[in-house]
Image: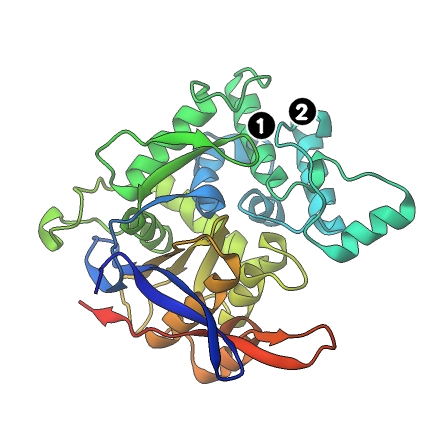
């Protein structure tokens, strides 16, 4: 079997398998020891929105969060790929007002809200969607807060050479343990996005849920030499995790958003962050199964977003993180139903893998 090309999902129509999606999964402890995997953990992925909780760390460490009295809800929306609902846009606008800026300062571009209800309401009101409806507007408001606090220019806050972006790169390197310069590209929201091995994304999320862990380089030959986090960085991370787990509706949206529903159903056990092109990262807080916590990252090879939710839920089930009751509550993501135009069930999307431990 090609280690990098493992079948994870089947699209079934009756008894017929009409499509398959391949990919990779890796779950690691904070030290980098691989607990379970499938496919190639060194697969290079583009992080996209999966790293928003990491991009939020400098907002706190810089002092911007304290200066502008950023609330738990505001911190959650900074970490979010939100649905553009009223609660999201009002929170982003409120944060910008604290900074002394406005919607016009956001450079993320505009797109129609992910929420069909929010989009339809705009249509009924005869209003156009704007940059504040962009799912990344919270992240950009956080970047602007950091820039304003540092006294740095806001006009070019997305430039890779800007102090805000340099701070994010430094934080990302520390969280992943990367010893290399990241290959950088432009994200859909025009902010920098980064390439890295899938395992490094998993390591970063393992440190998000256990920032006081210190990695030992000899723990696993795959592990990079990790640097211990400073106490202010660890406190910032705890704030981010608490904000996400306390405000799951701000991380995604009120309907049909895996991040929101998974965080809510898990009741404080984990954080979840989707990325475009079927990248997904999970951080499992220290628990009986994983006393040091666990980071998990997945990538669907062809970028098919429909394949990611069944893989996320099935992997968490196989790891023992989600019990049967929690799996049942997430059934719409675990085994999504395929319906025809008459709304008749004609098939389902199924995860078809067994994780390899060790």
Q: Nearer the viewer, mark 2 or mark 1?
A: 2
Q: Which residue is mark 1?
A: 144
Q: Nearer the viewer, residue 305 or 302?
A: 302
Q: Residue furthest left?
A: 218
Dot 1 crowding, Cα within 10 Å, few <14, some 14–19, many 20+: many
| Residue at position x 34%, y 48% in the image | 201
> In which quadrant will I find the N terminus?
bottom left
Q: Where residue 343 sits in the image (x, y, percent)?
A: 71, 77
Q: Where residue 195 sits in the image (x, y, percent)?
A: 35, 38
Question: How many marks overall?
Answer: 2
Q: Secondary structure at mark 2?
A: helix
Q: Which residue is mark 2?
A: 105
Q: Nearer the viewer, residue 301 or 288?
A: 301
Q: Where residue 106 sits in the image (x, y, percent)?
A: 65, 28
| Residue at position x 33%, y 70% in the image | 287
Q: Can you say whether 172 is above or below 295 in the image?
A: above
- Kindly report the distance in space between the C-alpha atoms of the residues bearing marks 2 and 1: 8 Å
Q: Is residue 239 visible?
A: yes
| Residue at position x 29%, y 38% in the image | 174
């Amino acid at each position: 079997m090609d280690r990098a090309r493992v079948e994870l999902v089947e699209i079934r129509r009756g008894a017929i398998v009409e499509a398959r999606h391949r990919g990779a999964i890796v779950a690691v402890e904070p030290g980098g020891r691989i607990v379970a995997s499938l496919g190639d953990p060194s697969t290079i992925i583009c992080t996209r929105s999966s790293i928003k909780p990491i991009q939020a760390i400098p907002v706190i460490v810089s002092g911007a969060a304290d200066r502008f009295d950023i609330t738990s809800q505001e911190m959650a929306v900074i970490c979010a790929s939100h649905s553009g609902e009223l609660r999201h846009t009002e929170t982003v606008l409120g944060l910008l007002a604290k900074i002394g800026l406005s919607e016009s300062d956001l450079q993320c571009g505009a797109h129609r809200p992910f929420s069909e209800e929010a989009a339809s309401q705009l249509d009924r009101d005869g209003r156009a969607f704007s940059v504040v409806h962009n799912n990344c507007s919270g992240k950009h408001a956080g970047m602007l807060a950091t820039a304003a606090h540092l006294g740095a220019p806001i006009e070019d806050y997305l430039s890779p050479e800007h102090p805000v972006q340099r701070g994010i790169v430094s934080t990302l390197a520390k969280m992943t343990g990367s010893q290399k310069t990241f290959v950088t590209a432009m994200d859909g929201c025009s902010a920098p996005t980064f390439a890295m091995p899938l395992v490094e994304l998993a390591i970063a999320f393992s440190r998000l849920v256990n920032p006081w862990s210190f990695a030992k380089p000899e723990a696993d030959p795959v592990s990079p030499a990790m640097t211990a986090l400073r106490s202010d960085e660890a406190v910032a991370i705890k704030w981010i995790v608490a904000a996400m787990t306390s405000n799951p509706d701000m991380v995604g949206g009120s309907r049909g958003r895996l991040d929101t529903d998974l965080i809510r159903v898990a009741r404080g056990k984990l954080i979840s962050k989707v990325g475009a092109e079927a990248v997904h990262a999970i951080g499992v807080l220290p628990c009986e199964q994983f006393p040091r916590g666990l980071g998990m990252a997945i990538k669907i090879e062809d970028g098919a977003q429909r394949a990611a939710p069944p893989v996320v839920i099935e992997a968490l089930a196989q790891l023992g993180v989600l019990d049967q009751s929690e799996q049942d509550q997430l059934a719409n993501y675990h085994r999504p139903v395929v319906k025809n135009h008459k709304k008749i069930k004609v098939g389902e999307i199924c995860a078809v893998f067994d994780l390899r431990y060790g």
